[in-house]
Image (cartoon, helix red, strand yellow):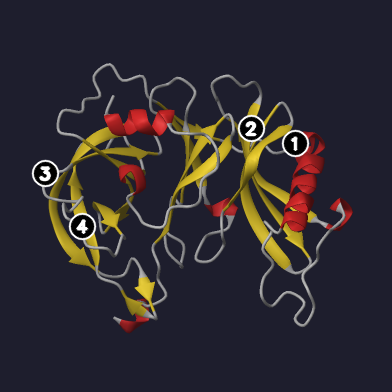
């Protein structure tokens, strides 16, 4: 196992702030573009050692498996991100490797030259939605209570145009919260029983928030990990994969759009741990400035 994967598996489980730059922990989004598999580095800061140099190796994880790929060539590209309605120049790399076992590519994890999949215990499993009336019975009250607690603490951020001229609510009754669980599936986490990952959308006043949450035996673990809707697809358009690098119950939850919606394809990654979920990657191909090409 690479040092990167070991560090990822042993990292603290407490929720952390979302990354400010792509390539955190060497994890990048991978997309299929015009029949090619392309890995993007959207960090605008210059790098002393370009992470996507020719010959660099990446473990690409997809909808059905993982395989090692090599950067065949790199180039500058436009169209994946915008700033002030102008396309940003990004670093991108064309990947070469065995695609058939991977399925739809989701993320690329940079690995060292000596990394090998020989003897790997990694597990990749597509997740099917398991939300029913019983899900609401087990978790509905807990989710609403957590949302109400976030309103009181200020963690629930109200939209600027929510009730203009009035102060945002300082408290809310659970009965006044509109909540829907859009996706949920059982996952395997070491040391826990009956673990369930879910994506819920809650509305307070005129503000809507979407969260990834983790529960064990009906108890929520950790805090909400926000999944903003700006440039992001509705949950129903996402597909979900559980990727456990060592097969020992310390997985990543991956989400992707199998087909690019009009506003751009997406890639998400979250670490699921006993203390709760934490964000690893959130990426969307930004189409807002394409008309300016």
Relative to 253, say whether 6 is above or below. Answer: above
Q: Residue at x 37, y 76 (%)?
A: 83
Q: Disc 2 and disc 1: Cα gap in Å?
A: 10 Å
- Mark 4 vs 3, N-terminal side: 4
Relative to 89, say whether 265 is above or below. Answer: above
- Mark 2 vs 4, N-terminal side: 4
Q: Disc 2 and disc 4: Cα gap in Å?
A: 39 Å
Q: Residue at x 11, y 49 (%)?
A: 54
- Judged left or right of residue 9, residue 210 is right
- Mark 1 vs 3, N-terminal side: 3
Q: Disc 2 and disc 3: Cα gap in Å?
A: 39 Å
- Judged left or right of residue 155, residue 229 is left
Give the foreground label among 2 and 1: 2
Q: Residue at x 81, y 63 (%)?
A: 170
In terms of depth relative to the viewer, which is nearer, 240 or 159?
A: 159
**Which residue lies under the disc numbered 2?**
196
**Which residue lies under the disc numbered 1?**
135
Quadrant where the N terminus is found in the figure = top left
Secondary structure under badge 4? loop
- Crowdedness near tag 3: few (<14), some (14–19) or many (≥20) residues, C-alpha within 10 Å: some
Give the foreground label among 2 and 4: 4
Q: Residue at x 20, y 47 (%)?
A: 95
Give the foreground label among 4 and 3: 4
- Crowdedness near tag 4: few (<14), some (14–19) or many (≥20) residues, C-alpha within 10 Å: few
**Which residue lies under the disc numbered 4?**
47
- Mark 2 vs 1, N-terminal side: 1
Secondary structure under badge 1? helix
Q: Disc 4 and disc 1: Cα gap in Å?
A: 46 Å
Q: Residue furthest front?
A: 153
């Amino acid at each position: 196992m690479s040092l990167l994967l070991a560090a990822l598996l042993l990292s603290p489980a407490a929720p952390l702030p979302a990354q400010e730059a792509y390539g955190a922990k060497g994890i990048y989004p991978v997309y299929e573009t015009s029949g090619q598999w392309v890995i993007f580095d959207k960090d605008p800061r210059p790098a002393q050692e370009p992470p996507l140099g020719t010959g660099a190796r990446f473990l690409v994880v997809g909808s059905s498996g993982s395989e090692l790929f090599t950067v065949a060539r790199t180039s500058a590209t436009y169209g994946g991100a915008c700033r002030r309605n102008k396309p940003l120049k990004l670093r991108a790399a064309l990947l070469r490797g065995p695609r058939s076992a991977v399925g739809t590519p989701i993320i690329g994890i940079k690995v060292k030259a000596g990394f090998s999949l020989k003897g790997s215990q990694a597990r990749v499993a597509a997740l099917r939605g398991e939300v029913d009336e019983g899900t609401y019975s087990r978790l509905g009250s807990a989710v609403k209570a957590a949302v109400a607690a976030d309103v009181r603490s200020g963690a629930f951020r109200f939209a600027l145009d929510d009730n203009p001229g009035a102060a945002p609510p300082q408290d809310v009754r659970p009965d006044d919260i509109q909540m829907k669980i859009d996706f949920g599936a059982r996952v395997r986490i070491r040391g826990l029983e009956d673990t369930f990952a879910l994506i819920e959308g809650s509305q307070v006043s005129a503000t809507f928030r979407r969260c990834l949450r983790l529960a064990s035996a009906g108890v929520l673990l950790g805090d909400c990990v926000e999944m903003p809707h700006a440039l992001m697809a509705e949950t129903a358009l996402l597909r979900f994969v559980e990727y456990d690098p060592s097969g020992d119950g310390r997985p990543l939850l991956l989400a992707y759009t199998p087909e690019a919606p009009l506003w751009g394809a997406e890639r998400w990654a979250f670490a699921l741990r006993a203390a709760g979920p934490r964000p690893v990657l959130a990426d969307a191909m930004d189409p807002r400035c394409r008309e300016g090409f």
